[in-house]
Image (cartoon, rainbow, N blue to C red):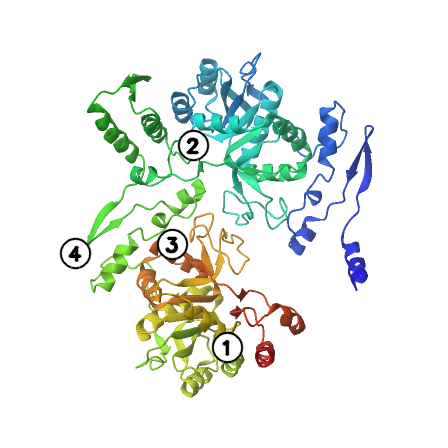
Amino acid sequence: MKVELIKNFKPTVSAPSPLKENGIRLYFWPTLDTREIQKRKMNFNPRQYPLGVDFSQLTKAVLDGKKIENHRINPHHFRYVHMAADKCKRKKLHLVILVKSKASNFEMRKAIRKTWGNITDSDITIVFMLGHIAGFEAKISNESDFYADIVQEDFIDSYKNNTLKTTMAFNWVSQFCPNADFNLYVDDDIFVNLENVKKYLKRKERRWGLFAGQLLRFSTPYRDEGSKWFVSWKEYPFDKYPPYLGGFFILMSQDVTSYFSTAIPYIKTIPIDDAYLGIVAAKLNIMPKSCPGLVRNMPGSVSYAAVPMNFKTVIGYHLITSPESLLATWNLYKYVTQPQFQVIEKNGKQNIQKLKGKNKEGMKVQLIKDFKSTVSTPSPLKENGIRLYLWSTLDSREVQKRKMNFNPRQYPLGVDFSQLTKAVLDGKKIENHRINPHPFRYVHMAADRCKGKKLQLVILVKSKASNFEMRNAIRKTWGNITDSNITIVFMLGQIAGFEAKISNESNFYADIVQEDFIDSYKNNTLKTTMTIHWAAQLCPNADFNLYVDDDVFVNLENVKKYLKGKERRWGLFAGQLLRFSTPYRDEGSKWFVSWKEYPFDKYPPYLGGFFILMSQDVTSYFSIAIPYVKTIPIDDAYLGIVAAKLNIIPKSCPGLVRNMPRSVTYAAVLMNFKTVIGYHLITSPESLLATWNLYKHVKRTH
């Protein structure tokens, strides 16, 4: 059997075919058509990404002075406008800092030169990497003549050309600074703590093989054509990028820079420069490493910033949005690291003055005031006797532009949800506009399902209105509940033509909850909202609620054991924990969410919607909060957003199996019913019945 499986597998892979190039034998692997890769949903494979040659051999050949006659599939045919050719001349440098800057960002470059880029170390130098923007030629020429730190080529300076700018940076530093030990590539919206960079490099035992920064794994390409990060399937046909480093801060040893500079002409480009460097690294078999002390997003206030921005540990600080913000950050840094000094700017020049006595505390207050003025501060809004803070939220385009991680304060409605929920539970009326109203009416309510009962558990099954057979199968199997302190209901939307049949079902079983919204996948968030409101309103005395899809087998005995092990009956929000999930930007996907609907790069941690356990207090908090939290069509990710707004942490629940195996014989191994708590993707009533029979058999015989 093993031999046969291997035989079946072998025809699906390609063996390398030799290609002799100028006296050195390079292996040239056939690459699949991009449509074939997309069809197979393949993970990134360096051999399948053009050019399919052995890059360890290629780089060795080039570094040995041999000429490679392969066609360069990624030529860089641009010319220098300004070269800063003498920046490294006759110097043995420890570190070269290369700042990617938009040609028009004159003020930001000045601010860098006045702050962290005002370098006094003789073995460190800094240059700015620019493209070309029409109309700025004379001004940039003057800047280059005055500072002699401008490197510019004649490609158009745009976001889509960032890979060209990065390529220029590698080529320049390889050509003009070959004797440097390390190179630091940064964006111009970053504050660099140079003292900590030097400490980090001093700890390195060797001066080769370094490729470090903010490590990003499992990132998916953006397929939404409206996104600035859009990459087409033709440009990059794989589902995921290989691990790469966020482009705002990358540290490299000089040998790695040389390898990259050598390899890039032979590696197909994409317009996302940092992801492209991850591809190059994978082709070169260079592993990106995480660099500690990088802070990605600008905090909302100094009182909060004082925690993450511990200047003793922070190495780089991203998303400094203006020259004023950079100067304020620099002044705060100088105060924290040298509290006896203050930095005074007068007539465009900086002076450092020593503080005496009371002036020291006054200076601290002033620095914090200056820093606060560069970020959004909460503005008070008094609502019916309770003071809620309404934070200024950024426009979705601005959030998208900054590549911001999810921030509960920046997601509408920007109020303190702990105060909001407390006010509602105290019986106070909130007069804020409800940005997510739920204007639908019950068709069937199952109003007596919890009436006069003290229940331990309410099971709420989300079911498509037309799934009659699946609901009947649940009632005959795991949903045939004999415990008096557990009840089950089915949550439905409306589908035209099924009204009479559902009405009969509701009359017979008295377990149907239905509202008059259209029952579709895109309306799952409406169904989840209905479910939470119903449980909060009609079953307020229950201890716990279990929200499941109708394609789940629930091992109720193990659910009861799990709940029995809980020391408390509050604060529970558990299921299959999903982290670092990215929204789908492909409009053809059933999970598509537009940038306008959700402008952040990642969802906050959330629970897979097929199985979620909540204590009743959490259900109540969600029911109160949802009207004030902007909705998205992905219901489980939306609950993660609501949880983040409420500062409720989702927990992993053991014993959840996500996918249905192909056969029940295999299931007998995988589904150890002593531990499994829920089993997803039961695709038919027959499959559910077979699983139930297997469960009953295992229970009887073990």
Label 3 or label 4, whichever comes before in sequence order: 4
Asked whether residue 434 is in view, the answer is yes
Label 3 or label 2, whichever comes before in sequence order: 2
Label 3 neighbour load within 10 Å: few <14, some 14-19, many 20+ = many
Distance between the Cα atoms at labels 1 and 4? 47 Å
The N terminus sits in image quarter: bottom right
Q: Residue 515: image x %, image y %?
A: 38, 74
Which residue corresponds to the image point at 40% horizontal and 78% vertical from the top-left?
A: 486
Is residue 612 toward the left or the right of residue 232 in the image?
A: left
Quarter occupied by residue 399: top left
Q: Residue 511: image x %, image y %?
A: 41, 81
Distance between the Cα atoms at labels 3 and 2? 27 Å
Q: Residue 696: image x %, image y %?
A: 57, 80
Please give the residue where the numbered disc 1 appears in the rendered image.
Answer: 466
Dot 3: what SS? helix
Label 4 or label 2, whichever comes before in sequence order: 2
Which residue corresponds to the image point at 68% horizontal and 49% vertical from the top-left?
A: 34
Residue 644 - label: 3
Task: Name the amino acid type tagged 3.
Answer: Ala
Which residue is more in the foreground, 556 or 213?
556
Q: Residue 577: image x %, image y %?
A: 48, 58
Please give the residue where the numbered disc 4 appears in the rendered image.
Answer: 385
Task: Name the amino acid type tagged 2.
Answer: Asp
Which of pointers 1 and 4 indicates the residue nearer the eye?
A: 4
Dot 1: what SS? loop
Distance between the Cα atoms at labels 4 and 2? 42 Å
Is residue 556 toward the left or the right of residue 629 in the image?
A: right
